[in-house]
Amino acid sequence: MRKQKILIIDDEPDIRDVLKITLECEDFEVHEAVDGVDGLEKVHKIGPDLVILDYRMPRLNGQEVCETLKKDILLRHMPIIMLTGKGELEDKVRGINAGADDYLVKPFEPVELLARIKMILRRSSRDLDANPLSRLPGNVTIMAELESAISKNHPFAVCYVDLDKFKAFNDTYGFEHGDEVIRETARIILGTVSRYGAKDDFVGHIGGDDFVFLTSPERSEILCQKIIDDFDKAAPSFYNPQDRERGYLLAKDRLGTEYRIPLISVSIGIVTNEHRAIRHVAEIGEIGADLKKLAKSKQYSNFVRDSRK
C-alpha cells in the first residue's frame, strides 16, 4: 500500500525534527523543506498528499507559498495546515484567506496535529477521487461522468490522450523525470480545457500517461490541436541539452545495435456519438483504444476523430 506523503515546510530544524519523528511513527512518508522557495520546489518534485506550512519563513512566507500553490490548477486541492505563532491573529487570518485548510498555534501538541492531519486526509480522499500524481479525478469519477453523458443523450466527445515514446523516456531519465512529464501534461490538458472549453467540460487522469477529457463535438478538435501545440512546445524541455539538440534518444536493442527514439509526442482519439448511438461506457473505451492505436501509428503528435457510423 502506498504511504501518504507529507511535506513539512519550516525554517526551524527543531520543529521539523519533532514533526518528522511524530509522523514517521504513524507510517507517513515525510519530506522536509527549509524555507518557502525550497518548499515550492519540493512540492513540484514529490507531489505530497498534505503540506504542513510555517507562516513566518525567509525568502517566501507561508502566505505567499499558500497563495502560489492555490493558483496552480493541479495543486489547488492539496490540503495545507498552517503553523502560526501564539497570539498572532493576523497570521491566522492571512493564512486562512490565502487558502490554508486548517491552522495550529505553536507550541502545539503532536497528538492534536496528527488528529487534524488524519481528518483532513480522510476528507480529501472522500471528496476527491484524485490521481495521487496529477490530483486530477480518477477512474471512479471518470466512469460516473461518462455514464452521465450517455444517459443525457446529448452530443458529446470523449477525447483519450496518450503519450508516445514515454516508456523509453522513463527508462533513460528515470521515474522522477517521468512523473514531471505526466504532471506537465496534466497542466497542459487542464489549462487548455479551462481556457477554451465550456464550464462543464471534464478532465480526468486514467493512470500513468493516459488522460481523458469530455467536451462537445464542435469544441473537441480545437481543444485537441491546442493541447498538441502546447505539448510539442514543451516536449524538448523535458530532455537534456544533448538529446534536445539531436532531436532524439539513442538506445540499444538486445543485440547491442544502436537505434534512435524520437522525442515524446502525444496521440489523441476523439470518440463521439454524432454518427452512432453509444449506450455503454465500455463502447467508448473500445472505440477510444482503436483511435489511439491509429493516432500512434503516425509517429508525430496528432489526433484522430471517429467518423464511423
Image: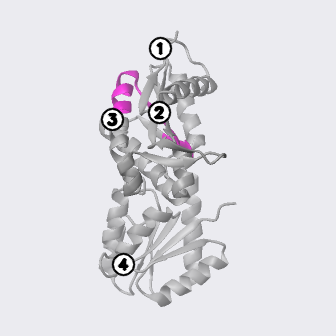
Badge 2: few (under 14), some or many (20 or more) residues near its Cα, within 10 Å? Answer: many
Precedes in sequence: disc 1 or disc 4 = 4
Q: Mark on residue 226? A: 3
Kindly check if marks 1 and 4 are in contact, taking CB atoms under 8 A apart as contact: no
* Kind of residue sitting beneath label 1: Ser
Q: CA distance from mark 1 to mark 4?
A: 55 Å
Quarter residue 35 falls in: bottom left
Precedes in sequence: disc 3 or disc 1 = 3
Please state which of the two labelled residues, at mark 4 or mark 3, is closer to the viewer.
3
Residue 126 picture location, percent across and down: 58, 53
Badge 3 marks a residue whose secondary structure is: helix
Q: CA distance from mark 2 to mark 3?
A: 13 Å
* Magenta span: 204-225
Q: Residue furthest bottom?
A: 14
Which residue lies at the image location 53% right of the left edge and 29% below the top edge? Answer: 292
Q: Which residue is mark 2?
A: 267
Residue 39 picture location, percent across and down: 41, 72
Quarter of the image with the N terminus is bottom right
Q: Which residue is mark 4?
A: 55
Badge 3: few (under 14), some or many (20 or more) residues near its Cα, within 10 Å? Answer: some
Residue toward you, 115 or 221:
221
Badge 4 marks a residue whose secondary structure is: loop
| Residue 4 vertical position relative to residue 18 in the rendered view, above or below | above
Q: Residue furthest right?
A: 1
Precedes in sequence: disc 2 or disc 3 = 3
Kindly check if marks 3 and 1 are in contact, taking CB atoms under 8 A apart as contact: no
Can residue 290 be seen from the camera position used here? yes
* Direction from residue 15 to residue 22 in the image, left or right: right
